[in-house]
Amino acid sequence: MSWILAQTLEEHFQRFLNGLWENSGTLLWKGLGIVLIIVGGKLTLNLISRMTSRQIKKSETLPLAQARRIQTMMTMTRSTFRYLVYAVCALMILAQLGFGDAISNLLLSAGIGSLALGFGAQSLIKDVITGFFMMFEKQYSVGDVVKIDNVEGTVTATAMRVTYLKDGQGHQIIIPNGTITRVINYSRENSIAKVVIGTPYEADTRKVMAIIENAALEYAATRSDIVVEAPKVLGITELAASSVNITVTCITKPCQHWEMERGLRMALKEALEQEGIAMPYPQQDVHLVNHN
Protein backbone atom coordinates (compact mmCIF):
# COMPACT_ATOMS: atom_id res chain seq x y z
CA MET A 1 0.00 0.00 0.00
CA SER A 2 2.77 2.42 0.90
CA TRP A 3 4.61 1.42 -2.30
CA ILE A 4 1.56 2.36 -4.41
CA LEU A 5 1.25 5.71 -2.58
CA ALA A 6 4.93 6.47 -3.13
CA GLN A 7 4.63 5.60 -6.83
CA THR A 8 1.57 7.84 -7.19
CA LEU A 9 3.34 10.78 -5.52
CA GLU A 10 6.36 10.24 -7.75
CA GLU A 11 4.18 10.29 -10.87
CA HIS A 12 2.45 13.50 -9.76
CA PHE A 13 5.79 15.13 -8.99
CA GLN A 14 7.18 14.04 -12.37
CA ARG A 15 4.18 15.53 -14.17
CA PHE A 16 4.66 18.74 -12.15
CA LEU A 17 8.31 18.95 -13.21
CA ASN A 18 7.41 18.24 -16.82
CA GLY A 19 4.82 21.01 -16.69
CA LEU A 20 7.35 23.44 -15.27
CA TRP A 21 9.82 22.53 -17.99
CA GLU A 22 7.28 22.86 -20.78
CA ASN A 23 6.09 26.26 -19.48
CA SER A 24 9.45 27.48 -18.20
CA GLY A 25 9.63 30.26 -20.76
CA THR A 26 6.19 31.58 -19.85
CA LEU A 27 6.83 31.28 -16.11
CA LEU A 28 10.19 33.03 -16.43
CA TRP A 29 8.61 35.84 -18.42
CA LYS A 30 5.77 36.26 -15.91
CA GLY A 31 8.22 36.16 -13.00
CA LEU A 32 10.33 38.84 -14.64
CA GLY A 33 7.20 40.90 -15.19
CA ILE A 34 6.25 40.64 -11.49
CA VAL A 35 9.75 41.68 -10.45
CA LEU A 36 9.60 44.69 -12.79
CA ILE A 37 6.19 45.66 -11.39
CA ILE A 38 7.51 45.55 -7.82
CA VAL A 39 10.65 47.49 -8.72
CA GLY A 40 8.60 50.05 -10.65
CA GLY A 41 6.28 50.49 -7.68
CA LYS A 42 9.18 51.06 -5.30
CA LEU A 43 10.81 53.55 -7.69
CA THR A 44 7.52 55.42 -8.02
CA LEU A 45 7.09 55.62 -4.24
CA ASN A 46 10.69 56.80 -3.82
CA LEU A 47 10.14 59.48 -6.46
CA ILE A 48 6.97 60.70 -4.76
CA SER A 49 8.72 60.70 -1.39
CA ARG A 50 11.62 62.79 -2.74
CA MET A 51 9.27 65.25 -4.45
CA THR A 52 7.13 65.77 -1.33
CA SER A 53 10.21 66.00 0.91
CA ARG A 54 11.64 68.66 -1.40
CA GLN A 55 8.43 70.71 -1.15
CA ILE A 56 8.42 70.35 2.64
CA LYS A 57 12.04 71.54 2.76
CA LYS A 58 11.23 74.57 0.60
CA SER A 59 8.26 75.46 2.80
CA GLU A 60 10.55 76.07 5.79
CA THR A 61 11.39 79.52 4.37
CA LEU A 62 7.69 80.51 4.13
CA PRO A 63 5.46 81.98 6.86
CA LEU A 64 4.62 79.43 9.54
CA ALA A 65 0.91 79.02 8.68
CA GLN A 66 1.63 78.55 4.98
CA ALA A 67 4.51 76.15 5.69
CA ARG A 68 2.33 73.97 7.90
CA ARG A 69 -0.38 73.91 5.25
CA ILE A 70 2.09 72.74 2.61
CA GLN A 71 3.54 70.09 4.96
CA THR A 72 0.04 68.76 5.64
CA MET A 73 -0.79 68.56 1.93
CA MET A 74 2.50 66.82 1.13
CA THR A 75 2.08 64.16 3.84
CA MET A 76 -1.50 63.55 2.71
CA THR A 77 -0.36 63.33 -0.94
CA ARG A 78 2.37 60.85 0.00
CA SER A 79 -0.14 58.68 1.84
CA THR A 80 -2.69 58.79 -0.99
CA PHE A 81 -0.17 57.81 -3.67
CA ARG A 82 1.15 55.01 -1.48
CA TYR A 83 -2.28 53.35 -1.38
CA LEU A 84 -2.80 54.02 -5.10
CA VAL A 85 0.55 52.52 -6.14
CA TYR A 86 0.00 49.45 -3.94
CA ALA A 87 -3.43 48.88 -5.50
CA VAL A 88 -2.21 49.29 -9.10
CA CYS A 89 0.77 46.96 -8.52
CA ALA A 90 -1.49 44.33 -6.93
CA LEU A 91 -3.84 44.42 -9.93
CA MET A 92 -0.95 44.16 -12.40
CA ILE A 93 0.56 41.22 -10.51
CA LEU A 94 -2.82 39.45 -10.55
CA ALA A 95 -2.94 40.00 -14.30
CA GLN A 96 0.54 38.45 -14.65
CA LEU A 97 -0.60 35.41 -12.66
CA GLY A 98 -3.44 34.79 -15.11
CA PHE A 99 -6.40 36.17 -13.16
CA GLY A 100 -7.49 38.39 -16.05
CA ASP A 101 -6.24 41.68 -17.34
CA ALA A 102 -5.90 44.77 -15.16
CA ILE A 103 -9.28 46.19 -16.18
CA SER A 104 -11.09 42.98 -15.24
CA ASN A 105 -9.27 42.94 -11.90
CA LEU A 106 -10.28 46.54 -11.30
CA LEU A 107 -13.93 45.68 -11.92
CA LEU A 108 -13.60 42.61 -9.69
CA SER A 109 -12.00 44.71 -6.95
CA ALA A 110 -14.86 47.19 -7.18
CA GLY A 111 -17.34 44.33 -6.74
CA ILE A 112 -15.39 42.87 -3.83
CA GLY A 113 -15.09 46.35 -2.32
CA SER A 114 -18.85 46.81 -2.51
CA LEU A 115 -19.34 43.45 -0.83
CA ALA A 116 -16.74 44.21 1.87
CA LEU A 117 -18.42 47.53 2.56
CA GLY A 118 -21.44 45.65 3.80
CA PHE A 119 -19.29 43.51 6.12
CA GLY A 120 -17.45 46.22 8.00
CA ALA A 121 -15.38 48.34 5.61
CA GLN A 122 -17.53 51.35 6.51
CA SER A 123 -14.96 52.41 9.10
CA LEU A 124 -12.18 52.43 6.49
CA ILE A 125 -14.27 54.52 4.07
CA LYS A 126 -15.23 56.84 6.92
CA ASP A 127 -11.57 57.31 7.91
CA VAL A 128 -10.57 58.24 4.36
CA ILE A 129 -13.49 60.61 3.73
CA THR A 130 -13.05 62.31 7.10
CA GLY A 131 -9.33 62.75 6.41
CA PHE A 132 -10.01 64.55 3.14
CA PHE A 133 -12.63 66.80 4.73
CA MET A 134 -10.26 67.72 7.56
CA MET A 135 -7.55 68.63 5.05
CA PHE A 136 -9.81 70.77 2.85
CA GLU A 137 -11.45 72.46 5.86
CA LYS A 138 -7.99 73.20 7.30
CA GLN A 139 -8.96 71.95 10.76
CA TYR A 140 -5.28 71.41 11.63
CA SER A 141 -1.91 71.17 9.95
CA VAL A 142 1.40 69.43 10.58
CA GLY A 143 3.09 71.19 13.50
CA ASP A 144 -0.12 72.39 15.14
CA VAL A 145 -0.71 71.67 18.82
CA VAL A 146 -4.18 70.18 19.10
CA LYS A 147 -6.53 68.33 21.39
CA ILE A 148 -8.38 65.60 19.52
CA ASP A 149 -11.20 64.34 21.70
CA ASN A 150 -9.28 63.56 24.94
CA VAL A 151 -5.77 63.40 23.46
CA GLU A 152 -3.37 66.37 23.30
CA GLY A 153 -0.23 66.55 21.21
CA THR A 154 1.58 67.99 18.22
CA VAL A 155 0.50 66.87 14.75
CA THR A 156 3.50 65.15 13.15
CA ALA A 157 1.80 63.78 10.02
CA THR A 158 -1.58 63.38 8.38
CA ALA A 159 -2.40 60.36 6.26
CA MET A 160 -5.39 59.29 4.23
CA ARG A 161 -6.70 57.13 7.05
CA VAL A 162 -5.04 58.27 10.28
CA THR A 163 -3.54 61.29 12.02
CA TYR A 164 -0.23 61.03 13.91
CA LEU A 165 0.32 62.97 17.13
CA LYS A 166 3.24 63.19 19.53
CA ASP A 167 2.32 63.92 23.14
CA GLY A 168 4.33 65.76 25.79
CA GLN A 169 6.20 62.57 26.74
CA GLY A 170 7.30 61.87 23.17
CA HIS A 171 4.84 59.03 22.60
CA GLN A 172 3.42 58.62 19.11
CA ILE A 173 -0.37 58.48 19.04
CA ILE A 174 -2.20 57.19 15.96
CA ILE A 175 -5.84 58.28 15.66
CA PRO A 176 -8.16 56.92 12.93
CA ASN A 177 -9.67 59.96 11.21
CA GLY A 178 -13.18 58.49 11.31
CA THR A 179 -13.20 58.42 15.12
CA ILE A 180 -12.45 62.13 15.50
CA THR A 181 -15.47 64.03 16.81
CA ARG A 182 -13.97 67.21 18.29
CA VAL A 183 -10.76 69.13 17.61
CA ILE A 184 -9.30 71.99 19.65
CA ASN A 185 -6.49 73.74 17.77
CA TYR A 186 -4.21 75.71 20.10
CA SER A 187 -2.02 77.00 17.26
CA ARG A 188 -4.49 79.14 15.28
CA GLU A 189 -5.42 81.93 17.71
CA ASN A 190 -3.75 83.77 20.59
CA SER A 191 -3.78 81.88 23.88
CA ILE A 192 -4.76 83.01 27.37
CA ALA A 193 -2.47 82.23 30.27
CA LYS A 194 -4.40 81.86 33.52
CA VAL A 195 -2.80 81.62 36.95
CA VAL A 196 -4.71 81.20 40.19
CA ILE A 197 -2.60 81.96 43.25
CA GLY A 198 -3.72 81.37 46.80
CA THR A 199 -3.06 84.03 49.45
CA PRO A 200 -3.57 83.84 53.22
CA TYR A 201 -6.72 85.21 54.82
CA GLU A 202 -4.57 87.10 57.35
CA ALA A 203 -2.91 89.24 54.64
CA ASP A 204 -4.17 92.61 53.37
CA THR A 205 -5.81 91.46 50.13
CA ARG A 206 -5.63 94.87 48.43
CA LYS A 207 -1.92 95.06 49.17
CA VAL A 208 -1.45 91.51 47.95
CA MET A 209 -3.23 92.31 44.69
CA ALA A 210 -0.98 95.32 44.12
CA ILE A 211 2.13 93.16 44.68
CA ILE A 212 0.79 90.54 42.29
CA GLU A 213 0.01 93.11 39.61
CA ASN A 214 3.46 94.70 39.78
CA ALA A 215 5.21 91.35 39.72
CA ALA A 216 3.11 90.14 36.78
CA LEU A 217 3.81 93.30 34.75
CA GLU A 218 7.53 93.12 35.49
CA TYR A 219 7.73 89.51 34.38
CA ALA A 220 5.67 90.18 31.25
CA ALA A 221 8.09 92.95 30.28
CA THR A 222 10.88 90.36 30.17
CA ARG A 223 8.82 88.10 27.89
CA SER A 224 7.76 90.55 25.22
CA ASP A 225 8.55 87.85 22.66
CA ILE A 226 5.45 85.87 23.63
CA VAL A 227 3.17 88.45 25.33
CA VAL A 228 0.40 90.02 23.23
CA GLU A 229 -1.43 91.93 25.98
CA ALA A 230 -0.18 92.83 29.46
CA PRO A 231 -1.33 90.70 32.41
CA LYS A 232 -4.52 91.63 34.24
CA VAL A 233 -5.43 90.89 37.85
CA LEU A 234 -9.06 89.80 37.82
CA GLY A 235 -9.35 89.99 41.60
CA ILE A 236 -10.67 87.47 44.09
CA THR A 237 -12.16 84.54 42.20
CA GLU A 238 -12.65 82.16 45.15
CA LEU A 239 -12.77 82.21 48.93
CA ALA A 240 -11.40 78.75 49.49
CA ALA A 241 -11.16 76.81 52.72
CA SER A 242 -7.58 77.87 53.45
CA SER A 243 -6.84 80.66 50.98
CA VAL A 244 -8.10 83.72 49.16
CA ASN A 245 -7.58 82.82 45.51
CA ILE A 246 -6.61 85.62 43.11
CA THR A 247 -6.60 85.07 39.34
CA VAL A 248 -4.22 86.64 36.84
CA THR A 249 -4.64 86.37 33.07
CA CYS A 250 -2.40 87.29 30.15
CA ILE A 251 -2.90 86.99 26.39
CA THR A 252 0.05 85.35 24.65
CA LYS A 253 0.98 84.17 21.20
CA PRO A 254 -0.44 80.76 20.17
CA CYS A 255 0.65 77.85 22.38
CA GLN A 256 2.80 80.10 24.60
CA HIS A 257 0.36 80.23 27.51
CA TRP A 258 1.89 77.20 29.24
CA GLU A 259 5.32 78.84 29.35
CA MET A 260 3.80 82.12 30.53
CA GLU A 261 1.86 80.38 33.30
CA ARG A 262 5.00 78.66 34.61
CA GLY A 263 6.94 81.91 34.63
CA LEU A 264 4.13 83.88 36.28
CA ARG A 265 3.78 81.37 39.11
CA MET A 266 7.46 81.64 39.95
CA ALA A 267 7.49 85.45 39.69
CA LEU A 268 4.39 85.88 41.87
CA LYS A 269 5.61 83.43 44.51
CA GLU A 270 8.98 85.17 44.78
CA ALA A 271 7.36 88.62 44.96
CA LEU A 272 5.03 87.61 47.78
CA GLU A 273 7.85 85.93 49.71
CA GLN A 274 9.96 89.09 49.43
CA GLU A 275 7.11 91.01 51.07
CA GLY A 276 6.89 88.47 53.87
CA ILE A 277 3.61 87.00 52.66
CA ALA A 278 3.75 83.23 52.95
CA MET A 279 1.86 80.77 50.77
CA PRO A 280 -1.27 79.49 52.53
CA TYR A 281 -1.71 75.91 53.61
CA PRO A 282 -4.53 74.01 55.32
CA GLN A 283 -4.82 74.91 58.99
CA GLN A 284 -7.09 73.76 61.77
CA ASP A 285 -7.80 75.50 65.05
CA VAL A 286 -8.39 73.23 68.06
CA HIS A 287 -10.23 74.69 71.06
CA LEU A 288 -9.87 72.83 74.36
CA VAL A 289 -12.81 73.30 76.72
CA ASN A 290 -12.40 72.54 80.42
CA HIS A 291 -15.75 71.45 81.86
CA ASN A 292 -14.46 71.28 85.44
Image (cartoon, rainbow, N blue to C red):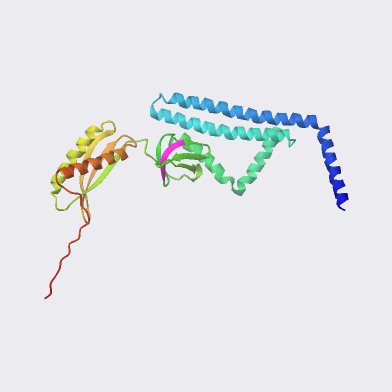
Which of these two is toward me, 94 or 169? 169
Residue at 21% of width from left, 39% of height from top?
A: 216
Residue 166 location, quadrant: top left
Rendering coords of residue 143 (x, y %): 42, 34
Q: Is residue 233 visible?
A: no
**Secondary structure mainly formed by the magenta segment:** strand
Which picture quadrant has residue 145? Answer: top left
Q: Name the one closer to the observer, 190 or 274.
A: 274
Q: How many marks?
A: 0
The answer to whether 247 is drawn above or below residue 132 in the figure is below
| Residue 25 is inside the magenta segment | no
Question: What are the residue bounds of the magenta stretch?
Answer: 151-156
**Residue located farthest toward the left when viewing the structure as drawn:** 292
Q: Is residue 260 above or below residue 54?
A: below
Give the position of the C terminus as an image quadrant.
Answer: bottom left
User: Which residue is farthest bottom?
Assistant: 292
- The answer to whether residue 89 of the structure is visible from this angle is yes
Tell me if residue 245 comes above or below residue 137 in the rendering: below
Please give the name of the residue rendered at 66% of the width and 43% of the height, measured from the top-left corner.
Answer: 112
At which x and y percent is residue 105? 69, 36
- In the picture, measured across the screen, residue 104 lies left or right of residue 8, that is left
Magenta span contains residue 152: yes
x and y percentages locating residue 179 in the rendered image: 49, 46
Residue 164 image position (x, y, % from top left): 47, 39
Picture residue at 13% right of the left edge, 45% below the top: 207
